[in-house]
Image (spheres, helix red, strand yellow):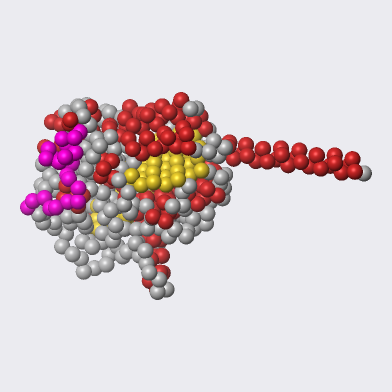
Amino acid sequence: MKKILIVIILILYSVSSIWAKNSQKGESQKPNILLIFTDDQQWNSIQALGNKNIHTPNMDRMVEGAVVFRNAYCFGGNSGAVCIPSRNMLMSGRNFFRFDADVLRMKANGEKPRKAHYTNPDWPTIPKSMREAGYETYFREKSGSANNPVVRTQFDHFKDIHQVNALRTGRPAQGIIDDAIQFLTTERNPEKPFFMYLGIPAPHDPRWSLKQFRDMYDEEKMPLPENYLPQHPWDIGSMTIRDECLEKWPRTEDAIRRHVFDYYSVITAMDFDFGRLLDIMEEKGLDENTILVFTSDQGLAVGQHGLMGKQNIYEGTMKVPFLVKGPGIEKGNSDAFIYIHDIFPTLCNWAKIAVPEGLDGISFHTILNKKEHKTRENLMLAYMDFQRSVRDERWKLIRFPKIDKTMLFDLKTDPFETNNLAENPEYSNKIAELIEKLEEEGKAQGDTVNLFPGNYAPAKFIAPTKKLPTAFPAGGLAPEDPAYKENNLKQ
């Protein structure tokens, strides 16, 4: 009897050991996930996506073999610093209307409210879900208040990078990529899959790059945006916010060429260090089991429609580059409507865990595996209480509730939104149809703004006669700036 018990114990021990090994193997077989999240990068600022005027050899490498989402967007912002709600929507999978509602709840309950552009850290978040799925989580991001400070600490490894200092080196991604390479090569736990979030601080201003990158461009020959205007015709809200004060009014062609020169140069400088990261991943074989997601918090106007910043919901500002590649993902293009905050539920699918309840984001996993070609019929955009928009596969309506202005664009024939059809009575039925869609979308998303409130403000915008003070230098650094001299001494 004693021998039989010993045999049973040995069998049970063997079975449990095999189960434990298989369980550990299952964890390690989950794909690593690398999310690169740039700052203020226009959707068409990668050469492989059709822009022949920009040099991005390493982002072009990312495009190779990737699924390119052609209609990926930031939902918008409830703050002039759109990068803040953008990042918090990413981390929470919820739109910013939910943040607003939660702050009102806190006030009604007598609680001290947090900033309205922050997500509630007690809600499900990307780092909490990925850690629960067995991932080692890693965070590098620009310093300041872009991500809820509590959410940052939910990562296993987290560190802020001083944004302006990083931008003034002339290689804005260098510090973050240095740290990422160190983690991948010497610090990570090889027994666990990793989730790595790299929040790159460029091409946000101040835009400065080393001479080797600036020399790739001729400032006088830089292309103007297809929808360049010296000044926006209306006051659409936030017209003299710091981004808009980066250039005086009216915006001249020469001035916009200089800004585009700075913008493209710093994107190329950023791209250089992406190459170092891709090389290390290939050298270590990590690329074979890593899903790469590349996108940005939102775009930027840089002269489009007479605007400079991100406080608008035109295509050039809210549409973002969006690439996904990795094991089991077949190269292709998708015109499906997706938001940045769709990333959270998709990560859960890749990590083989349940998607938390209450998210606004919709996983695009079914698009990647070709079970569906879209997850939405329409797409809504919003900026504070100044602007609302809805679009379908062809038409886009923008509504400015405070000044009683409406715009209508046929994106099929007018992708850069230069021909406003709203003044043409032939399109009155289309406008009514899209207004109805916008109201439906707003209700579903939790919007409380009245599209036709009455008591409208004057629409006319009277531009200041000179540039206003800004927090950062405009465009490239001035020759008297110490960083200018320091970088030029390095050449």
Q: Is residue 64 left or right of residue 57?
A: right
Is 482 magenta? The answer is: yes
In this rendered view, identify the residue nearer to me: 30 or 440. 30
Q: Is residue 300 left or right of residue 245?
A: right
Is residue 447 visible in the rendered image? The answer is no
Name the residue at 18% across, 30% down: 489
Q: Is residue 134 left or right of residue 296?
A: right
* Depicted 217 relative to depicted 34: above or below: above
Q: Position of residue 257 (x, y in %)?
A: 15, 36
In this rendered view, identify the residue nearer to me: 483 or 263. 483
Q: Residue furthest left?
A: 465
Q: Position of residue 365 (x, y in %)?
A: 50, 42
Name the residue at 36% across, 29% down: 275
Region rendered in magenta: 465-487
* Depicted 460 relative to depicted 276: above or below: below
Q: Position of residue 174 (x, y in %)?
A: 32, 35
Report the number of discs.
0
Q: Position of residue 13 (x, y in %)?
A: 76, 41
Name the residue at 51% across, 50% down: 129
Is 257 magenta? The answer is: no
Which quadrant of the rendered structure holds the N terminus? Answer: top right
Q: Residue furthest right?
A: 1
* Depicted 116 relative to depicted 221: above or below: below
Q: Quadrant of residue 6?
A: top right
In this rendered view, identify the residue nearer to me: 100 or 412. 100
Q: Quadrant of residue 294?
A: top left
Name the residue at 27% across, 28% down: 55
Which quadrant of the rendered structure holds the C terminus? Answer: top left
